[in-house]
Image (spheres, rainbow, N blue to C red):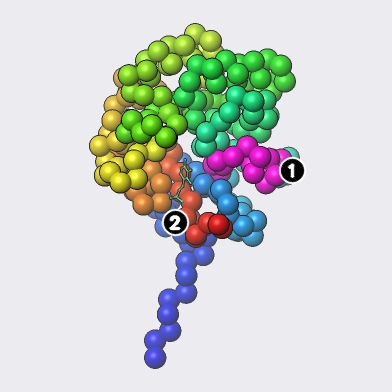
């Protein structure tokens, strides 16, 4: 009788994913709804860049660790309400989901008020024009990008997208990369568990991987 292959550990999955994406791409560990033991396992495997979807969940998980873990980088990859802007700038190094002028203004104000280090920003683009999804439309991207440059020079570093689940991701990734080039932005956050290798080939600088790294999320 052959014994079943033991499941991959987080350290093994991380090594495999890193080899698939190559050295120039950053693995963002999408840690929403993952148990604490797995976060510890990822940290022990030297993972330092984490993406979180919700400000409150991220605060509970990272506020203390932020002081203790060397080299930690926290990225907000979920939608942000303007009334959470102060908490967000206090915790996150990077906010990937800027998608409207009102949020830009709230972030500028939050940094002024709290004296927090200004986060780097990515503009989320709704490449599939999905009504329920966050992100600025492709048509409105130039205005938002210009506005951000004026109000906060240097803050916007890249673009981010989440393609429609039911469509092939390739064309969305190619479009996002093209838009980033057009706007002179060098960083591109795209690709999740099912398509991070494709995203890396199409120019991602950051892939956001949850289940392929950690295993299935808690309900
Ligand atoms: C959850 C999430 C991910 C990771 O999803 P997986 O399919 O588990 O890799 C990436 N990006 C965003 C914005 C997410 O919400």
Q: Is residue 71 visible?
A: no
Label drawn at residue 55: none
Identify which residue, 162 or 72, lies in the foreground. 162
Identify which residue, 24 or 213, lies in the foreground. 213
Farthest-out residue, front: 131
- Secondary structure beneath dot 1 equals helix
User: Cα distance, mark 1 to mark 2?
Assistant: 26 Å
Residue 75, image x, y percentages: 55, 36
- Residue 81, located in which quarter of the rendered image? top right
Quarter of the picture containing the N terminus is: bottom left
The residue carrying pointer 2 sits among few (fewer than 14), some (14 to 19) or many (20 or more) residues within 10 Å by Cα, namely: some
* Of the image marks 1 and 2, the number of the one nearer the N terminus: 1
Helix, strand or loop for the magenta stretch, by majority:
helix
Residue 76, image x, y percentages: 55, 35
Q: Which residue is mark 2?
A: 212
Specify whether 43 is left or right of 5: right
Q: Is residue 166 visible?
A: yes
Q: How many marks?
A: 2
Q: Is mark 2 within 8 Å of ligand 1?
A: yes
Label drawn at residue 64: 1
Identify which residue, 76 or 103, lies in the foreground. 103
**What range is drawn magenta here?**
49-64
Identified at 33% across, 23% down, the residue is: 138
């Amino acid at each position: 009788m052959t014994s079943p292959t033991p499941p991959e550990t987080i350290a093994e999955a991380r090594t495999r994913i890193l080899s698939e994406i190559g050295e120039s791409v950053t693995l963002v560990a999408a840690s929403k709804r993952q148990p604490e033991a797995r976060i510890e396992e990822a940290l022990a495997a030297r993972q330092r860049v984490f993406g979180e979807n919700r400000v409150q969940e991220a605060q509970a998980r990272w506020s203390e660790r932020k002081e203790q873990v060397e080299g930690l980088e926290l990225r907000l990859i979920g939608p942000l309400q303007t009334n959470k802007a102060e908490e967000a700038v206090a915790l996150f190094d990077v906010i990937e989901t800027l998608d409207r002028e009102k949020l830009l203004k709230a972030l500028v104000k939050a940094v002024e008020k709290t004296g927090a280090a200004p986060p780097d920003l990515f503009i989320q683009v709704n490449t599939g024009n999905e009504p329920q999804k966050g992100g600025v439309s492709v048509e409105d991207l130039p205005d938002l990008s210009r506005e951000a440059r004026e109000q906060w020079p240097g803050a916007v570093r890249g673009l981010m997208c989440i393609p429609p689940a039911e469509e092939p991701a390739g064309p969305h990734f190619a479009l996002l990369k093209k838009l980033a080039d057009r706007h002179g932005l060098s960083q591109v956050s795209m690709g999740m568990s099912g398509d991070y290798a494709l995203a890396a080939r199409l120019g991602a600088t950051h892939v956001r991987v949850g289940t392929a790294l950690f295993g299935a999320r808690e309900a």
